[in-house]
Image: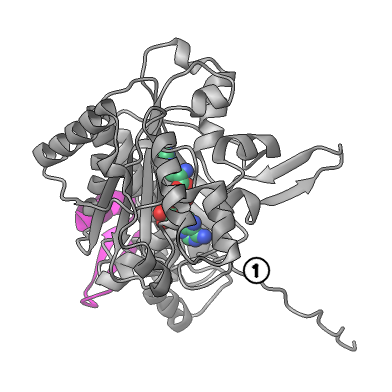
Amino acid sequence: MPSEPRPPALSAPKGVPDYAPPASAGFEHVRDTLQRAAARAGYGLVELPVFEDTALFARGVGESTDVVSKEMYTFTDRGERSVTLRPEGTAGVVRAVIEHGLDRAGLPVKLRYAGPFFRYERPQAGRYRQLQQVGVEAIGVDDPALDAEVIAVADEGFRALGLTGYRLEITSLGDAECRPAYAERLREFLAGLPLDEPTRARARLNPLRVLDDKRPEVRALLADAPLLKDHLSAASAEHHAAVLAHLDALGVAYVENPRMVRGLDYYTKTTFEFVHDGLGAQSGIGGGGHYDGLMATLGGQPLPGVGFGLGVDRTLLACGAEGVAPWSQARCEVFGVPLGQAATAELVTVAARLRRADVRVDLAYGGRGLKGAMKAADRSGARLALVLGERDLAAGTVGVKDLASGEQVSVALADVVDVVRDRLG
Ligand code: HAM
């Protein structure tokens, strides 16, 4: 029969990473370790929609941000509604808290989430159009100790992975009392500088954003810019000092960065970023902060919140940069090598018994010979192989082979679960 021409192979959309075995073991470990740190502090899981009404992000994240104005994946669905793939998690969590009245029970409401987010950014190393975050939000209580807890949970997650080459940068973005006056002062300062028109436009929209300009010539012009930390309200200054005191007590190291500007508009008071030195330009492995107005902006009670989003992709890259890989890439612990159909039938049931005993087991399918099956066993990363031939089957035994040392012992089929569990320790 003439063979059909193959259609061209397809690839994933530009800027979207795939994680397949064995590398996905690292992804899973990073995500789960970061989440466990949050679960240990009492943050309950929320699973929220990956797309929401576009208005949620426009209102919640802020129209002046790049995230909303340039980077959203927005489309009209078949019912003529404008929906957007979530670019971040905080707005959706606050929407859900309000919608389900979660803030009517005990406060703070402490929630965690993990999953994909979408931003139409220019792809480069560590910057993707589908990015993965682990996040938390604690809503309903204005307490510097809670801000410090959120930061400490993130720090604990990174530390549990074995990371050391990162620093925590922190500042206060003030509150409704001091920010408008400061913004006016900064606007006046910026108006006196020879800035280009796009930068002037940014200054008009949100002058704080100009402080984040990376161009050396603009940085030089901004050397004497007024800084918010010198113009905080008494309440904000007190809150900030208390957060830092809690971090000191917790042994969480930080550096103050009064020029930090986050890409989202909802922050007030505590604002922070975790920066890793081994990652080049995309060095932010996590960030977050306190937000006083978001609940009210989205139609809820005027309650404050605080949270973080940690980048799983970048944290995995940071592990690579530091050479830490505290996870196993082995797909399974035990690999079955059946020689013949009857042996396959028997090993299938042995595998089921082992799996029920919480042992990870795979076996060679497709009637492979001994050599091919042993190769598959090695490739699987298993520590033990169960080799079953016709003679073993007749004797009711199975060969248990240590794949590192090559040593093999014969074990009664009836005892194999106990022996394997014992061997795996
Ligand atoms: P964010 O700083 O925009 O904050 O994102 C958090 C983290 O997600 C970043 O530090 C970075 O590690 C990762 N990330 C962001 N964009 C990309 C990208 N294009 N490619 C790879 N990784 C990326 C938020 O999203 C806030 N919702 C965090 C928060 C929660 N604030 C309060 N509560």
Residue 29 appears at what percent x and percent y?
35, 55
- Answer above or below: position of 152 versus 330: above
Q: Residue furthest right?
A: 1
Residue 332 location, quadrant: bottom left
**Magenta stretch holds residue 410:** yes
Regarding mark 1 in the picture, which secondary structure is present there?
Answer: loop
Q: What residue would you read off at disc 1?
A: 12
Residue type marked 1 = Ala
In magenta, the rendered stretch is 396-425
- Answer above or below: position of 332 versus 53: below
Residue 356 appears at what percent x and percent y?
40, 43
Left or right of 51, for residue 256: left
- Choose between 345 and 310: the one closer to the eye: 310
Residue 63 appears at what percent x and percent y?
62, 44
Residue 263 shows up from this direction: no
Q: Residue at x 33, y 61 (%)?
A: 333
Q: Residue furthest bottom?
A: 2
- Answer above or below: position of 329 versus 286: below
Residue 60 appears at what percent x and percent y?
57, 35
Q: Residue at x 32, y 41 (%)?
A: 36
